[in-house]
Structure formats: C-alpha cells, structure tokens
Amino acid sequence: MSVEPALSVVIASVAGLNSLQDLLASLAAQEGQTPAEIILVDRVGRVVREFVRREYPQVRLIEASPRESLPELRRRGIESARGALIALSEDHCQPASDWFSGIAAAHRQNPAAAIGGSLENAAAERLIDRVVFLMEYAAFCPPVASGPVKQLAAANVSYKRTAFESGTAIQSGYRETRLHAALRESGRVVWMEPRLRVWHKKRYGLQQALSERFHYGRWYAGEREARAGPGRRMGILILSAGLPALILGRLAANIFRRPQHWPTFWLGLPLLIGLSIAGTIGEMIGVVFGPGRSSLKLV
C-alpha cells in the first residue's frame, strides 16, 4: 500500500542538468521521516529526463513543452501534487538537510497559508554572482525576522493545500507575488520562518544577467498593465525615469541591515546600476508592447 505524501515538492526544470544535479542530491538526502514526493516539471528535454529516470526513479517527472513558461510549469506541478503541504524551490538551489521536516513542523505549529524561509548565496566566489543574487534576494537574506510578511521567494516557500483551493490565483500560472497578495487580501497569513534555509547557487555571465533583468521587467510590467488604458501607460512611462533610483534605494535599505553584504554592494554598484536600468527598459517595453515571449526567457 502506497503512503500518501505529507509534502509535495514542485521543481520547474528550466536551467539544464548541471544546475539540477545538486538540487536532486540534496532532496534525496533529507533527514527525518517526512513522507514527501518530488515533482519535476521539465521543459529542457531528453538529457534531463534520461538522467532523472536513471538516477532518481522515485521522482515524478512531468514532461513539458519548451514553449511553456516558468509560471506555467509551476502551475502544472502544483495541480498534480498529492501532499497536504506543497513546497517550491528552484533547480539551481540546495535546501538544508532538515528542509522537509522543518516545513512540516512549521505548518503544524502555524496556521499561516504560506510559510517561506531565508536564502543564502552558495555561488559567492565571483562579484557578478554575488551582485545578481543581492539584486534578486537581498530581502530574504539572513538576518530575517520570523513573522508576517508581504512576500516570500519562490526558491523557498511552502503552502497548505487550502491556499490553492479556489484555483483562481494560479489559473494562468504560479506567480508568487500575485498569489501572496491574493492570500493576504482574503485574510490569510503569509509568514517568514528563517530557520527554513535554502542555498541559491547560480552563476551568471554579464549578458545573461542583463538579459534576465530585462525580460523579468518586461514580463512583470506587461502582465501587470495588460488592461491599462493609454493614459495610464503614458503616466507609467513618465514615472519610469525614476525607477532605477527607486530600485537601488530599496536594495540599499535591505543591505543596510545586512553588513556582511556591504562590500558587495559598493564594489558592485556599477553593475547594480546597469541591472536596474536593464530592468527599467524591460518594464517600459512591457508597458507599451506587452510581455511578449519574455516569460520563456526566465530561468
């Protein structure tokens, strides 16, 4: 008789086999007795799928099209999950060895609909990797306080199944910002639990880093303003001139509370400015022309 999993872990496979191997090894080596299923939704193709079937036959593999976006891959995994709890991470991450048991304990003790944890950088040798990590995840770096928050990172987040009961928040794909806002608007709690730890391990080239910021900006703004009228679009374009300064100001506020990252912030300031400008240009194009195919560029 098969045991129903207490926890379903959904991973969208978009970055290739090299990124995925460390993640699968860390999931296979989890401590404790939490029954869990691993759901890998893969759009990469044959090399990844053959490796997973050979080395990790216990993983539930869902084959996806290269034309499916990251939010769509995650939605498919969530909808196929059987666990009472559903967690997400990314294919270039490495959860702590007590991640499964920590998630289960956190949800037993806390009625929050969504519980996420902290992120640390495991690709810290090069300045560019440290800079891009901070640009994306500074708000989730230790030290972070336990308590209600507005947002959690999709690289380290978990939900009670009831968070998805209506289905409307992920109908067009899982987007953590939209889902967490919907949960809070319905009176549910989104909670940060820093003892749930995940290491982020991703290496970038300069062109890749700038491209990802551009496409994220275009995708985000294009979807956000899909129904906006001409007047609103023009107003957003005018205000966008100040967006790089706003992005850097928010980042500086997060870094100020984390002195261990001050050297990276100052040494990497020219790159941070470039990334902020690339994201702003992406948002401006998204406002005018929509998201295009930018969601397929997110890895």
Image (spheres, rainbow, N blue to C red):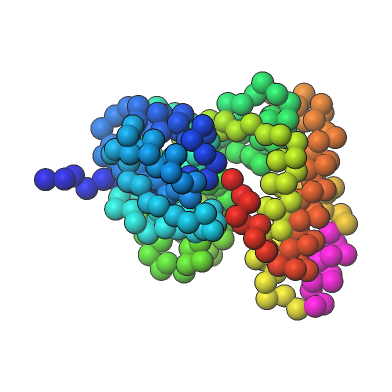
**Residue 33 percent location from the top left of the image:** 25, 32
* x 45%, y 31%: residue: 21
Q: Camera-side residue: 160 or 90?
A: 90
Residue 25 visible to an observer of this rendering: yes
* x 43%, y 44%: residue: 46
**Residue 23 percent location from the top left of the image:** 45, 33
Horizontal side of 32 relative to 239 (left or right) equals left
Q: Which residues are magenta?
A: 230-240
**Residue 168 percent location from the top left of the image:** 46, 69
User: Is 257 included in the stretch rendered in magenta?
Assistant: no
Q: Give the quadrant of the C terminus.
A: top right
Residue 142 visible to an observer of this rendering: no
**Residue 282 in the image: above or below residue 118:** below
Horizontal side of 1 relative to 213 (left or right) equals left
Q: How many labels, in total?
A: 0
- Furthest residue in direction front, as rendered: 46
Q: Camera-side residue: 279 or 47?
A: 47
User: Is 233 included in the stretch rendered in magenta?
Assistant: yes
**Residue 201 in the image: above or below residue 46:** above
